[in-house]
Image (cartoon, rainbow, N blue to C red):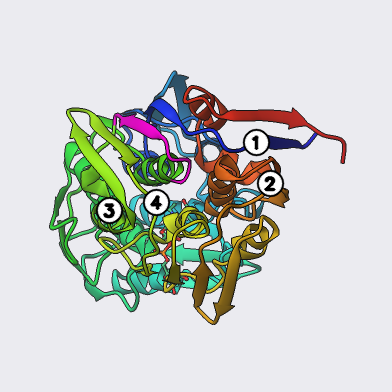
Amino acid sequence: MPTILKIQGGKPLKGTIEISGAKNSALPLMVACLLTDKPLTLSNVPNLADIQTITQVLNVLGVTAQENGSTRILDASNITSTTAPYELVKTMRASVLVLGPLVARFGHAKVSLPGGCALGARAVDVHLEGLRAMGATCDLDEGYIVARAPNGLRGAHFTMRVVSVGATENLMLAASIAKGQTILQNAAREPEIIDLANCLNAMGATVQGAGTDTITIEGVSTLNGANVKVMPDRLETGSYAIASLITGGDVTLTNTSLKYLPMVRETLEKAGAIFEEKDNGFRVYRNGPIGGVDVMTEPYPGFATDLQAPFMALMSVCEGASMITETIFENRFMHVPELVRMGASIQVHGASAMIRGAKSLSGAPVMATDIRAGIGMVVAALAAKGTTTISRLYHLDRGYENLEAKLQACGADVERHKVDV
Ligand code: EPZ
């Protein structure tokens, strides 16, 4: 039976929210287990639908996964298949990350082509170009990418056509056990890339330069197991910081750090946010109204596309106006019509949205169209007058652990209900 979130808006969030481990780091770290026949132990893994999906993908390949709270012990000593099926890959594009490690360790891999998603076409051509540069053949067969490198992968000097988080990760994973040196240029610089490099290095790899646009990997013949803690979720952090601001609340976020959100912090400060850093996190609140600020999404360290929807919700009730330009995904304004249903004044022209701040939003039935559009709805609903119901919660459950409990602990009136279709 489907579920909805029912949010009675207008209550300032006050209290403390503990931030979970980062979904977008946990996914590639879990995939890294494929590179070794020794167990890889990961802690601070969030309990999310996407984590269950990647676990299922790994299980299909023969990986055993033990779960103990937020710890996962992954053992890829007995791989029985190198095929990642369509049924799983179509539900989560990040499944394509198994391609590089499988072909690097076993010389072959068959992974369903992810196809379209809510954010647009989202190709994987850069992943394939990189693997080809490392000596693999990559062909398309009945909807599957079939990659072969019977004599193993060899290091390569590869410049990415576009900055891609997933391609950078796939190629780092593959290069860590390729023969010789790989240099990845125009690499993504997200903190999750640094987390992956640290994990690979803990497993015995030699990865340097993660966090810059040039990553150098000296391939090694085998990797070991390791014990690694997943970094905090910077997107969950940013989402709750915005929720605190839109409700005029005062929230302390723990188990996280502002260092992962340089441009988001700067932008929110321009809009009127006050941040106070603490040992294990930070406090975020405001003393006056929120002002309009223009934003363009960009690869890290720019403003994260994944926080564009909640930021637009915030701008919907700012004093003045704001222009938000989306440069990463062609289809990431699906939340606009939903915000408009709540009374927001937004006009989209191509990749830009012009938002004129309204005095307030009003509750309405709306839907989550992807993970981050979903949190945009939650943020808007927390500040709106009246009741908002949000459907298609499976999107939110992919990326936000214990969402209602975390918000309720700060005084929000949020409930999950089962509904008849
Ligand atoms: C990662 O997706 C994140 N997912 C996304 O988070 C995030 O929105 C995105 O990076 C951008 O920051 C995970 O980390 C699991 P990309 P990814 O490859 O790696 C184009 C969330 O809500 N491109 O950096 O798939 C692509 O079409 C999710 O948690 C190519 O053209 O994104 C896009 O326009 C949603 N060819 C741009 O690059 C390729 O081969 C950036 O995509 C690969 C990408």
> Mark 4 sits on what residue?
289
Please give the label number shown on residue 269.
Answer: 3
Q: Dot 2 surroundings within 10 Å: few (below 14), some, or many (20 or more)?
A: many
Q: Nearer the viewer, mark 3 or mark 4?
A: 4
Q: Is residue 345 magenta?
A: no
Q: In this orientation, which residue lies closer to the viewer: 260 or 413?
A: 413
Q: Earlier in the sequence, mark 3 or mark 4?
A: 3
Whole-angstrom CA distance, mark 3 to mark 2, is 27 Å
Q: Is residue 249 magenta?
A: yes
Q: Position of residue 322 (x, y in %)?
A: 43, 69
Which residue appears farthest toward the bottom when viewing the image?
A: 350
Q: Name the residue rendered at 24%, 65% in the picture.
A: 154
Tag 3 and tag 4, C-beta contact below 8 Å: no
Q: Which residues are magenta?
A: 246-255
Q: Earlier in the sequence, mark 2 or mark 4?
A: 4
Which residue type does callout 1 highlight? Ile
Q: Name the residue rendered at 33%, 62% in the picture.
A: 303
Which residue type does callout 3 highlight? Glu
Whole-angstrom CA distance, mark 3 to mark 4, is 12 Å
> Mark 2 sits on what residue?
363
In the image, 242: left or right of 393?
A: left
Q: Is mark 2 within 8 Å of ligand 1?
A: no
Q: Nearer the viewer, mark 1 or mark 4?
A: 4
Q: Position of residue 395 (x, y in %)?
A: 61, 46
Please give the label number shown on residue 7.
Answer: 1
In the image, 54: left or right of 338?
A: left
Q: Earlier in the sequence, mark 3 or mark 2?
A: 3
Which residue appears farthest toward the right when viewing the image?
A: 420
